[in-house]
Image (spheres, rainbow, N blue to C red):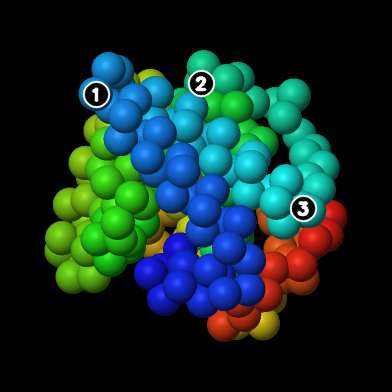
Amino acid sequence: MSLGLLRALFITDPLIVLATAAFGTVNLIAALFNASEEKQIDIARAWSRRLLRITGVKVTVHGLEHIDAAGAYVFVANHVSYMDTPVIFANIPAQFRFLARTELFKIPFIGTHLKRAGHIPVPLEAKAFLRTLTEAGRLVRERGISLLIFPEGGRSETGELQEFKDGAAYLAIKAGAPVVPLGLIGMYQILPMHSIHMRPGHV
């Protein structure tokens, strides 16, 4: 979430902002006693589940029987809403990190968590982006964790699938890991782009 969105949400749904601040505080305290990335991911999962409860979003997942929670994958998902990542965190059991725009790492609480959890900032410059993907592939190979990428390069304005960028295929090749496509259906009705009004619904 951007800082502007968080400010707007505080007006329309302060519980979301309060939950984010509360879990951000828990994150900071937990880091004093257990600095592992896995602990940060556990907290992020708890935060994600809380957001889904607050917003009344019900999730049905198909295909989890094909996923080994201890396996290493490149998860490739369509991107419609700021709520996409919480939905995935709350429902995909694998240990994964995601690639996110550098600006998100500058947001209070959220940016600190992203760094401690081992998520990967994505630069805009093309050569730096390729170096980032190469490093992310090494992370998958050497540590056996998964990565999440939104190959459209940003959220869809209309909810329709956009053309994929080349990064996801490059990352999968560098990682030597299978690609797992994720289809998020119903997210546009929950929180479309440019909206600050979260609606309950079924995903």
Left or right, residue 25 beside residue 79 = left
- Image location (x, y in percent) of residue 153: 44, 68
Q: Residue at x 58, y 43 (%)?
A: 48
| Amino acid at pointer 3 | Val
Tell me where residue 160 appears, x and y as whole percent: 68, 76
**Mark 1, secondary structure of its residue:** helix
CB under 8 Å between discs 2 and 1: no
107 relative to 51, above or below = below
Q: CA distance from mark 2 to mark 1?
A: 29 Å
Residue 71's disc is 2
Secondary structure, mark 2, is loop
Which amino acid does the dot numbered 2 rest on? Gly
Instruction: Name the residue type under label 1.
Output: Leu
Q: Which residue is mark 1?
A: 32
| Coordinates of residue 51 in the picture (x, y in percent) | 63, 49
Residue 134 lies, in percent from the top left, at: 23, 45
- Name which residue lies at 74% across and 24% down: 65
Q: Nearer the viewer, residue 5 or 73?
A: 5
Query: Does the rendering let one see residue 174?
Result: no
Local secondary structure at mark 3:
strand
Q: Which residue is mark 3?
A: 57
- Residue density around tag 2, few if under 14, some if 14–19, many if 20 or more, within 10 Å: some
